[in-house]
Amino acid sequence: MLGWVLFNDKDLWLRFTMSSTGSVEKTSYSLGGALTDFTAVSPQISEKLFLILRKKFVADVSSRIDTPTMGAYVPFLRKALETNPYLFIYLKFYAECLILSCDKRDDLEPVLRSFLCDEVANEFLPNMLLTNDADQTAEWLGKVIGRDMEFRRSRTKAQIEDIVSPDSSLAKYTPAQRLYILKCENSSGLDGSFKMQIASEYDFERTANLGTVKASLINNASTVLAEYEINKPDDLIALELFHTVTNQLPIKKCRCCGEYFVPSGRSDSEYCSRISLGENKRCAQIGAMRTFKGKYAENPIYAEYNRAYKRNHSRLRNGKLYDEEFRDWSAAARRARDEFINENKTVEQFRLRLTELEID
Ligand SMILES: [Zn+2]
């Protein structure tokens, strides 16, 4: 089992154990945000993360006499956990398989089969490439599990597209109806049945006695919720998608990177808050700049400012202005430009101001 999930208003809580001997932990994510962030993970990033685990495993195996344990991977997995529950589930599963490959290799096939989607399992499991070479085994496992992640990621993205896009062939249905129709399709991954239990928002130890529970509930306003068992990544995908859609949370396509997101603040925001590959700014920052430029570029005052800027800049290059003069002039002209645009003044008024600012 991968863990449990419960939904509390606009939050998704994942309960899990870090290793088979560890206690149950809980981490929260924004509902819909976790799933759309997963669909936005670029293959280059996930390949890099799988490679870090593979290299660490190979180094551990070659430098140690005893078999590595999950403990060695916990710091790395915690970082993944902070980022995204799906990424965490995949990387944790990869680490578990690497450890199994050392001394319980016969267990690997059933473990992989219970996790992977049929499409990927049928493609790779008939020819399992497990040798005594740790790196070769780690590479093969990374390839299979990485392939499964990419398969589910792109399938989920296509399903979200079908649910929210106005161009979808299902456009005449409500988003929740579209989800149901997708569920009825073959190999949608959304047709799981779930084992549910009554759970408390407060994390009682599974062994807590009734007296402890009652005493604690008197003092804590703890909500009682449905909690579902997660056995495959598909379980979490289906449950999160279902709760996001039925809670009518807005799923939007970012106008900058084109990936889906669920706005955490204003529901009319058009840009996600991720940093896409090769960028150093968040889409929201890039979007704000674009909106600013768009709003300004259409204004004749903006064009007038640009003309004056070019003229004075060439005076600077030709030695007719000092650096300091140009710097002071451009700062004042920029201030005037923004002020005149914001106050809806005319381009004639702005020209007058530019004349006042001009350096003889
Ligand atoms: Zn974006």
Image (cartoon, helix red, strand yellow):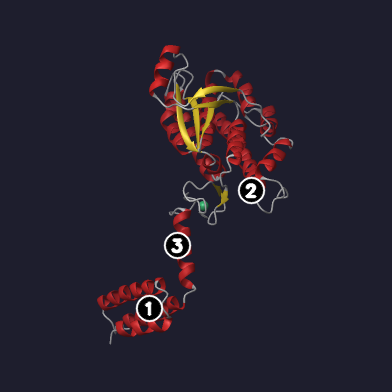
Which mark lies nearer to you, 3 or 1? 3
Q: Judge whether 213 appears above or below 130 on screen.
A: above
Q: CA distance from mark 3 to mark 1?
A: 20 Å
Label 3 belongs to which residue? Answer: 289
Q: Are marks 3 and 2 in contact (CB under 8 Å)?
A: no
Q: Residue furthest front?
A: 218
Q: Which mark is residue 164?
A: 2
Comparing 93 with 15, the one in front is: 15
* 2 or 1: tag closer to the N-terminus: 2
Q: Which mark is residue 309?
A: 1
Q: Judge whether 164 appears above or below 96 on screen.
A: below
The C terminus, quarter of image: bottom left
Q: Which mark is residue 244?
A: none
Comparing 66 with 148, the one in front is: 148
| Residue type (three-letter) at the residue carrying disc 3 | Met
Q: Position of residue 40 (x, y in %)?
A: 55, 46
